[in-house]
Structure formats: C-alpha cells, structure tokens
Image: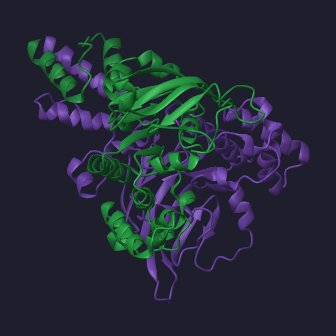
C-alpha cells in the first residue's frame, strides 16, 4: 500500500505499562505519521506523551511485542532492530542540563559519532558542519555548562544532526527556555527540517508551538482522543479545557466578548482576522 | 515594614581575572504583603538579586533591610538561620533537591530544621501537601515515584510548610502544563492574600499582568524600572528597546490600534481587554 509507504512512523495497538502502575501509560494506541510532516503531540503532564517518544526509539518496549507493532522508517521495532531504529530517531529532551557528556561543545556533538566508530577525519568535518548549522560555531570550544539554556538545546540538536536521523523528536524541548530562546529553537528546527528533509514530532503543551504543526495528535490517559489540523483541534475549547490545556488567545477572547454580548464569527480564529472583525464592528455601529 | 535595598552592588570573583559586576548600585523599597514580579533577561542579574534577599549572597557594597534584619558586606553568618526561616528562596527546578525516602519526611525536613516538634512538623507537612494540590496518599510514597509536576509541588510544599513571611520563587511554573501552571500561580496568590510577601522571578509577562502588584526590571545588573504593571507596560518603545515582551492582551490592543480601533487605557489582562472592547463597541452604538 502506498499510504503505508508515506508513513515514517506507525503505531498499531501499542500498550505499555510502567512497573507497578495500576494502569497502562499508553493504552492500545494506533497512529501514523507522514514522512516530512511536523506533528505536535499534545496532552497534559502524565497523559502518556513522553512515553510515546521513548517507545518510538525503543527506550521502552511495549508490554506485549506480539500484539503491538511499531514501525519506524520501514523497520519493525524488535530486539534485533532497536539499534537500527535509533539511527533514525534523535530526541531533544526537556532539561538541557541532563543531556551533556562532552567537556566542550564539539566533544559533545562528536559523542554519537564516536559511538558509531566514525573515522576521525570525517568526524571533524561532520561536527564542524553540525555545530555551524545550529549557529554555535563560535562556541565549539566552550564548556557546555557556561551556555544559556537555549544554546544548550542548540548543541543538543547539533549532536542529533551529526547522526543524520530521519526523525527529530522535541520532547518539551522548549519548555524550560525563555521566550527568546524558545523562538530561536523553533526557527532553527523549522530550518533544519526543510534543509535535511526531516520529520518533526514536537511533544508539547505550548499552544504556540503546537500551532506550527501540520497535524496535532491529542492524548489523554494513554489514548489518542483526537487528531487533525491545529485549526480543527484548537477550535474545540471544551476538549482543551477538559484535558487541562491552554485555550488559544483568540478563542478565549471571543468567549469573554460573548459573555459581554458581543458575538464574533466562529471562523475568525487568527489574531489578524479577529482584529478586522472587531474594527468592523466598531465602524458599522 | 518594608524591604529596602540601598546602593547595593555585588562583585563576582573580586580581584580575579574573572571579576564581574553582578549587581550595580541597586536601590528600591518594596512593600511587605505585595506580590512582586522580578523580570529581565537571562543574565540580567535577577538570580543574583534574588540570592541577596536572605543573604545567600551578601552585598559587596550597600545595605539591605529585610524582615527586621540588616545585611551589609560586614554581616557574618551568625543569626542567618532565623532570617532564612522568615525569607525563603525557591530556585528553578526545586524538585532536583528532593532527597528523603518519603514525601512526608521531605516536606517535614524544613519545619524540623527550624525547630518545629515532630508532631507539629507532620501537621504542617500534611496541611501544605494538601494546599499544593496533592492527593493524601502521596505522603507515604517515595518522591522519586512521582511525576515531575508532582515533585515540583512537593518541593514547594517543603518551603511553605514553615510559612516564611517572604517567599521568593524563580520560575516556579516552568515546564508545567497550563492547568498546573494556573494552579501554581493561584497557590502563590493565595499565600500572598494570607498576609505573606511573594516575589516571583519570571519571563511570563501574562503572569506579571495577572498577579503582580509591583514590578522590578533588571538589565545588566542594574534596576532599570520599578513600578506597578500598568506603568511598566505603558511605554511600548521603551519595552522594545529593552527587548521585553508585553502581555498578550496589550499586544492585541496595539494591533487593534494600528487598524484604527484604539481602546481606552492600556488593557494588560484578558478581562481588561474584553471590557475595553465591549466599552468601545457600546460607545460606537450610541
């Protein structure tokens, strides 16, 4: 089937339970992600989002490998293929301080290549390229501990680029950054996604980050409860409220205005559209 | 009583090649009982300033008056324990500092350290675990079996349990989901309403608009503004010049104004924005 070939990640009936947990963290989950797409996986803390990212690259294994199926870039995840799968997937984690091993930025970026026994001459080239791709060339010799949070996340991304994966997962990778650092990381990921033909999965509860996606998957209690375009998902104020996520600015404002007797068209969900609607309301009256 | 900084400077690594100025002649007076926001970029001196509130860092120059204490460059370490019971700091990611076997003993640690009896420590620990929104059955669990958001609450309960008069928190809601973030902010607002002073270090301007009575703005170790949120967020060009964000509602009001629909005043919160729009529409109809 051609549709299957377009998918870079597919989950079929995946269930995972943490040891001693009363309920599965991921419960009979099935979904597919298209090659080259930007997908946002949203849900509150504890909804199972991060467990999904660990299942994708085999850091966790489903309860029953026979009943659950995970396919990454055409490779079915199994004990024998887990290292092949990890070649395809790079994860940027939430806390920039928890993912450094190297004494300098360049050492840290080289770590993955050293693990793969890349020849030194080649390694030097790849590291220099990756460090410059993320805009950190001036810091190649710097100690990671002296960098800001945003710079640390850029180094983490360089380490991933060096391995040339097909999929990059941002596991709440911007949630600890200040607004400027956050924007820089998102701009960077957008650029490297296009340049390297990557598939991006961003696990987030930041509504602005999720709105960058082509597709949004909504998780609650280990289950996929909805999926669709950001416009489709964000229009469901009740759903977002129920699972404890932020309601986008325009929807909140429309709600408050409605309470004050001002009805605005349902489909005005971009800020600029709402500005026009409000200004028209003013001149019409 | 007030919190007063007079000509406070702080020098990192004095006399060494790495010498740098962390605080540069900072002067302000804060009212006790206020909810104060401390804003500024990474590296602006916010954290350095915060550590002066309970003499974790002592000024290189100047004088600080806080909670009945005076802190000067000559202040020794004697008597600081009582100061730190009254003025507590909660650093970023305080969950990294949990260490006891059970949640209950972790929260009891602070009160016991400050001389509460075992019974009293248990009573306040259970009370504050509930106040921070944790279910009763977590008390006997290992803190390391909890989710990140729950661990954060345990760490904060551990400080609130001995009820410091002044609590200073560095980005306490970073990394929490939106619901957790709102619950956390309401917890601090309630703590303030109960008669305590809350100082919040934050990047989130919407939180500043929604919760703060007073705002300190730091840049390069200097205090560049100290005023109520309405005044701090009034001058758009000044904010831009200092690379500071505006609250989302006032950004939206600016867009409306640019499209020829100027609102009265400068709405900072969602409620203020909705009220101002409603008022304008009503006036247009009359």
Q: Nearer the viewer, residue A85 or B42?
A: A85
Give the vertical position of A199 relative to A153 (above or below): above
Which residue is nearer to you in this view: A105 or B184? A105
Towards the viewer: B172 or A82: A82
Q: Position of residue A92 (x, y in %)?
A: 48, 50
In the depicted structure, whether residue A105 falls above or below residue B254: below
Residue B44 seen by the camera: yes
**In terms of image quadrants, where is residue B121?**
top right
- Which chain is displayed in purple in the rendered image? B
Q: Position of residue A204 (x, y in %)?
A: 46, 37
Quadrant into which the C terminus of chain A falls:
top left
Question: Is B61 placed left or right of A227 in the picture?
Answer: right
Does B277 sit above or below residue A202?
above
* Nearer to us in this view, B13 or B55: B13
Kindly identify the residue that appears in the image at 46 percent across and 18 percent down. Answer: A239
Tell me the residue at 37%/54% (across/down): A181
Q: Residue at x 45, y 45 (%)?
A: A170
Q: Is residue A60 left or right of residue A159?
A: right
- What color scheme is it? by chain
Side (left or right) of B22 relative to B245: right
Q: Quadrant of residue A5?
A: top left
- Residue B220 in sight: no
Where residue A62 appears, x then y in whole percent? 64, 33
Q: Which quadrant does the N terminus of chain A fall into?
A: top left
In the rendered image of the structure, the colour used to display chain A is: green
Q: How many marks?
A: 0
> Measured from the top left, where is residue A56 in percent x and y?
53, 39
């Amino acid at each position: 089937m051609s549709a299957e070939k377009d998918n870079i990640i597919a989950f079929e009936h995946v269930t995972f339970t943490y040891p001693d947990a009363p309920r599965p963290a991921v419960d009979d989950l099935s979904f597919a992600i298209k090659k080259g797409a930007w997908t946002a996986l949203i849900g509150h803390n504890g909804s199972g989002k991060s467990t999904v990212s660990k299942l994708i690259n085999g850091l966790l294994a489903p309860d029953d490998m026979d009943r659950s199926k995970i396919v990454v870039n055409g490779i079915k995840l199994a004990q024998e293929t887990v290292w092949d799968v990890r070649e395809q997937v790079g994860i940027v984690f939430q806390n920039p301080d928890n993912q450094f091993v190297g004494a300098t930025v360049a050492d840290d970026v080289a770590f993955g290549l050293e693990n793969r026994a890349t020849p030194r001459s080649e390694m030097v080239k790849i590291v220099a390229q990756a460090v410059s791709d993320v805009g950190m060339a001036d810091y190649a010799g710097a100690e990671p501990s002296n960098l800001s949070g945003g710079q640390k996340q850029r180094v983490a991304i360089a380490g991933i680029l060096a391995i040339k994966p097909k999929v990059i997962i941002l596991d709440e990778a911007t949630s600890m950054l200040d607004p400027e650092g956050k924007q820089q990381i998102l701009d960077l990921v957008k650029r490297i996604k296009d340049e390297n033909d990557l598939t991006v999965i961003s696990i987030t509860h930041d509504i602005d980050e999720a709105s960058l996606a082509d597709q949004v998957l909504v998780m609650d209690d280990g289950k996929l409860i909805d999926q669709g375009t950001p416009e489709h998902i964000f229009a469901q104020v009740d759903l977002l409220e129920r699972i404890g996520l932020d309601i986008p600015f325009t929807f909140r404002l429309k709600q408050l205005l409605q309470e004050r007797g001002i009805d605005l068209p349902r489909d005005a969900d971009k800020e600029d559209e709402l500005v026009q609607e409000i200004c028209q309301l003013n001149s019409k009256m | 009583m007030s919190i007063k900084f007079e000509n406070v400077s702080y020098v990192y690594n004095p006399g060494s090649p790495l010498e740098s100025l962390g605080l540069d002649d900072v002067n302000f007076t804060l009212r006790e009982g206020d909810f104060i926001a401390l804003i500024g970029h990474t590296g602006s001196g916010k954290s350095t300033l915060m550590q002066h509130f309970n003499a974790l860092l002592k000024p290189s120059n100047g004088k600080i008056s806080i909670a009945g204490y005076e802190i000067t460059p000559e202040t020794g370490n004697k008597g600081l324990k009582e100061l730190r019971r009254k003025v507590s700091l909660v650093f970023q990611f305080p969950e990294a500092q949990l260490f006891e076997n059970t949640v209950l003993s972790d929260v009891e640690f602070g009160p016991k350290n400050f001389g509460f009896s075992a019974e009293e420590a248990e009573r306040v620990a259970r009370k504050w675990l509930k106040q921070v929104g944790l279910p009763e059955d977590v008390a006997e669990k290992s803190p390391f079996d909890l989710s990140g958001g729950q661990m954060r609450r345990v760490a904060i309960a551990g400080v609130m349990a001995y009820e410091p008069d002044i609590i200073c928190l560095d980005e306490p809601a970073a990394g929490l989901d939106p619901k957790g973030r709102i619950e956390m902010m309401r917890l601090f607002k309630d703590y303030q309403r109960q008669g305590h002073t809350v100082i919040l270090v934050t990047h989130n301007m919407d939180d500043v608009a929604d919760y703060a009575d007073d705002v300190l703005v730091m840049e390069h170790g200097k205090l560049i503004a100290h005023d109520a949120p309405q005044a701090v967020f009034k001058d758009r060009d000044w904010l831009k010049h200092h690379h500071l964000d505006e609250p989302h509602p006032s950004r939206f009001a600016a867009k409306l104004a640019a499209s020829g629909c100027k609102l009265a005043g400068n709405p900072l919160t969602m409620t203020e924005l909705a009220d101002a729009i409603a008022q304008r529409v009503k006036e247009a109809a009359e």
